[in-house]
Image: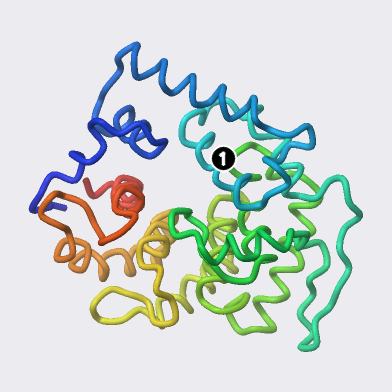
Amino acid sequence: MELKYSPYTIFKKSKNPYALYARTKWMGESSSLLKSKIQRLTDTLLRSQSRNGSWSDSVVRTVENLYTLSLLSPGNRSVGQKAVDWLLEKDHPPIIYVSGDGSPYSGLFFKVQHDDVKSIYDRRDLPFTRGCSGFFKTGAALYFSGIFGRSDDKRVAAAFKSLDKVLVIRKGKWCNIPCSNNILRGYLSHPCKRDSAQSRKALKVLEEVQTETGGWRGTPFFYQTFNTVAQSNLPGARRQMRRAMDRVARSQNRDGTWGRSNVEFNTFMILDALHRQGVI
């Protein structure tokens, strides 16, 4: 895919995690200074981690910092193990609950502080989007379980078992589109679920609400949705990516970025998706 403007300029002097990843993986920087910045940031995050594995018992902060670690220490699975355990609620008995429509929530991860519920709705710079706090946390728990080598955990298997049933009851969605996308990201990161019938069904439902201009009805989160779909090489994902490409090309700003706010994050979401799909 050819872009009219270079999309990498915004990262050249930035020190945030997205820029450090971009400079290392996409822009070919390998200086000792850059490596030192990455190590300092990683060390700082790990020093501020609470004993229970979280960051200040906050789902949002824990998700944010785990995502940073997944970018900057991808080969070191041990750095995220305790935080993943916290998201999986290892210190608490599994939830047992069935909703009024028969959807089984047993084994999902719904323990979220009140302040976190507001934070989930306020943040626009995370790969997981605002929506039901329980599905936000569950999607993140499953995603990072796949990233940090906890795919075989019994709690992960139990959560997927419940979510498989919810998908049937709700005819291809787990909740509304943003919440479903949070769960879908978890499915697409899991080695046993990324090519499953459930992933294919969820992608099919998402494809059905994609517009001719490349966006998706029911969600304002184009960048995160585009990035989530790009996690998959299934045919349904490929078709959606192709349909969205014209929008990506047309909406690029003259400085190479995307969006009007959170432009560094938006640009990272787009580029990460394009690189995963092998089109740039």
In the visual, does 46 lie left or right of 85? Answer: left
Pointer 1 local density, CA inside 10 Å: few below 14, some 14–19, many at least 20:
many
Q: Residue at x 79, y 75 (%)?
A: 104
Picture quadrant of residue 186: bottom right
Residue 37's spot in the image, x, y percent? Answer: 41, 21
Check the image and name the residue furthest to the right: 93
In the visual, does 61 lie left or right of 108? Answer: left
Q: Amino acid at mark 1?
A: Asn
On the image, numbered disc 1 is attached to which residue?
A: 65
Residue 115's spot in the image, x, y percent? Answer: 68, 60
Check the image and name the residue furthest to the bottom: 101
Residue 278's spot in the image, x, y percent? Answer: 28, 46
Residue 35's spot in the image, x, y percent? Answer: 39, 17
Task: Check the image and report above or below for 121 versus 151.
Answer: below
Q: Residue at x 43, y 54 (%)?
A: 125
Q: Residue at x 73, y 74 (%)?
A: 165
What is the secondary structure assignment of the residue under circle 1?
Answer: helix
Check the image and name the residue furthest to the top: 32
Q: Quadrant of the image for the C terminus?
A: top left
Task: Check the image and report above or below for 1 versus 47.
Answer: below
Picture quadrant of residue 14: top left
